[in-house]
Amino acid sequence: MKKTYIFLFAIAASIALTNCKSNEKKQDFTALTKSYFDDKNALDPLGATQNGQSAYNDQLQFEMTDSYRKTQATFFNKYETELAKIDQASLSNEEKNSFEIMKWEIQVGKLVLKQPSNLMPIHQFWGTQVTMGQYAGGTSAQPFKTEKDYANFLKRMDKYAVWIDSAMVYMKKGMKEGAVLPKALTLKVIPLFADMPTAKIEDNLFYSSIKLMPTSFSDAVIKDLTAKYTTAINEKLIPQYKKMTEFLKNEYLPASRSTSGIGSLSFGKELYKTYVKQWTTTEMTPEEIHELGLKEVARLTIEMEKVKKQVGFKGTLLAFFDEVRNKKELKPFHKPEEVIANFERIYTKIKPNVDKLFSLQPHSKFEIRRTEAFREKTASAEYNQGSADGTRPGIFYVPVPNVTEYNVYGDEDLFLHEAIPGHHFQISLQQENAALPDFRKFAWFGAYGEGWALYTESLGKELGLYQDPYQYFGMLGNEMHRAVRLVVDTGMHNKGWTREQAIAYSLAHEAESRESITTEIERYMAIPGQALSYKIGQLKIMELRKKAETKMGAQFDIKKFHEKVLESGVLPLALLEMKINEWIQEK
């Protein structure tokens, strides 16, 4: 018996030692994910503020500089080395997802650094100059509640004045190497800077937070902050905005290129392949995506013809597009507030049906707002995530640059995509998930995130929408819009299409106005590859749902399927497919 006890004790000790080593490995990996998140925030302090990481609220990245790119390279090499030390067998399934996500981000990040994309540091759609404007408004992610908050943004404004100089330095380097924006984009960038200086300081965007100072501040503090902000705006920012405006008009615009796609640049084709990989999280080639786009356009054209027949329109589909674009009944508003109220009505309409499709729902609050005036002319409708702690709501921004021309035919579909159950559900659930490491709570993969939002558009009828054929046509139109993107994005950046060719192709297949389509095409010119993410992700999620329905039969539960897709946050599509396949096999 004594020998048996000794033997059993040895086994128990061995198991305990193994468990201890396993826990140590897991602790090492947990610590690694934390330091990874901290270092990512340090590299992207504006993004950190968006994610509610307040330690970085006074910082600003100089993302175009060589020194910044060297820091990025060091970051990627450090974590590539650290990941190689991890025993993957000791990790849980969700930890293995974290491992693969870190590995994927590092791989793609290193690929992006191989090409000099930093020589074109600004465009009209997003970037530091746009984010700083949003934060300056005082109602976005940058907090303005305490004296320290105001001091933080003052420091950020000082750095931003220097950032504008750095942007010009690298744009001049780009001019020497032929790495410049297309002329059409430069023309859109100029107003972003030219419109910022104001005759009265009180009218300046960067003065907005001063007008929103808490009543708890003392008179002395109010006077001090007002003086400091006034000085920073008048003596630092406005001169820099004027300097950039003159540079753009007199030097950069004449040097801007006549081509539309980045494929025309010496390094453009390789960079585009990297962007395709980054935005789709697949190994698909630009050629494969172009062909897929053509097939989807053909399929959706047939569906649109059915709606045209349903409403009794006798002309061609192109003529029907004109009918939809110009139909007075679809342009009913006279005040921007009426546009916002219409989206509130859509929200009220779907609420009773959301529970039928979703058992997993976020706690985060949600608001609908008109897009800020300074960027409304060039902005698309969009969702801005709330804070993880729930203190800042998720916001669905709607641009209304010309209310009398605002067409409602796609509004039901748009709400599902940008708000509920699209981006607001997906992003809020991800941020609220205590089981995920922080770097995953704030991660983003376009193919999953935009793919999910586009997939939710197909749920409209189940949610009580699309009862009006024009609203259903709006859904088809928005899906067509994403299919067209596959064609025109690859067309411009890989096949050498011009901006005008892309606009003409879009007009031939969409019911959007020329003005709206032009803005969209210029968006794709500014951020190559991003437009591909929607359809690639949507098609994969729909494929996985169909597979689950077929394999599981009566056991298929739509609420459980949605839970499985959403519960782990954003994933590269290969990881999502693996997760759903495992769920199907378990059943």
Image (cartoon, rainbow, N blue to C red):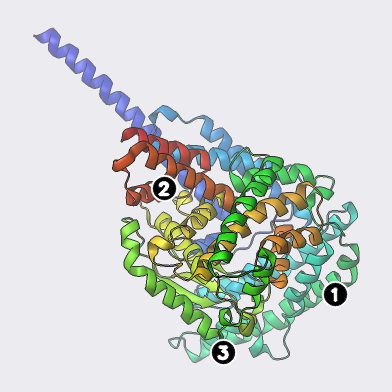
Q: Which residue is mark 2?
A: 565
Mark 1, secondary structure of its residue: helix
Ranked by sequence position, the earlier of labels 1 and 2 is 1
Position of residue 19 in the picture relative to residue 253 (left or right) = left
Q: Locate the N terminus by quadrant.
A: top left
Q: Which residue is mark 1?
A: 246
Percent position of residue 343, x then y: 47, 75
Q: What is the crowding at mark 3: few (fewer than 14 residues within 10 Å), some, or many (at least 20)?
A: few
Q: Which residue is mark 3?
A: 223
Percent position of residue 208, x then y: 59, 83
- In this view, the mark in front (2 or 3): 2
Whether residue 110 is situated above or below residue 55 in the rendered picture:
above
Would residue 126 be seen by someone viewing this image from the given angle?
Answer: no
- In this view, the mark in front (1 or 2): 2
Which amino acid type is marked by label 2? Val
Which amino acid type is marked by label 3? Lys
Position of residue 279 in the picture relative to residue 498 (left or right) = left
The residue closer to the viewer here, 116 or 363, is 363
**Structural distance between the alpha carbons of marks 2 and 3:** 52 Å
Query: Residue drawn 48% across and 43% down?
Result: 543
**Structural distance between the alpha carbons of marks 1 and 2:** 49 Å
Ranked by sequence position, the earlier of labels 2 and 3 is 3
**Structural distance between the alpha carbons of marks 3 and 1:** 33 Å
Would residue 488 be seen by someone viewing this image from the given angle?
Answer: yes
Which amino acid type is marked by label 1? Glu
Percent position of residue 581, x then y: 41, 36
Query: Residue drawn 63% across and 42% down?
Result: 108
Ranked by sequence position, the earlier of labels 3 and 1 is 3
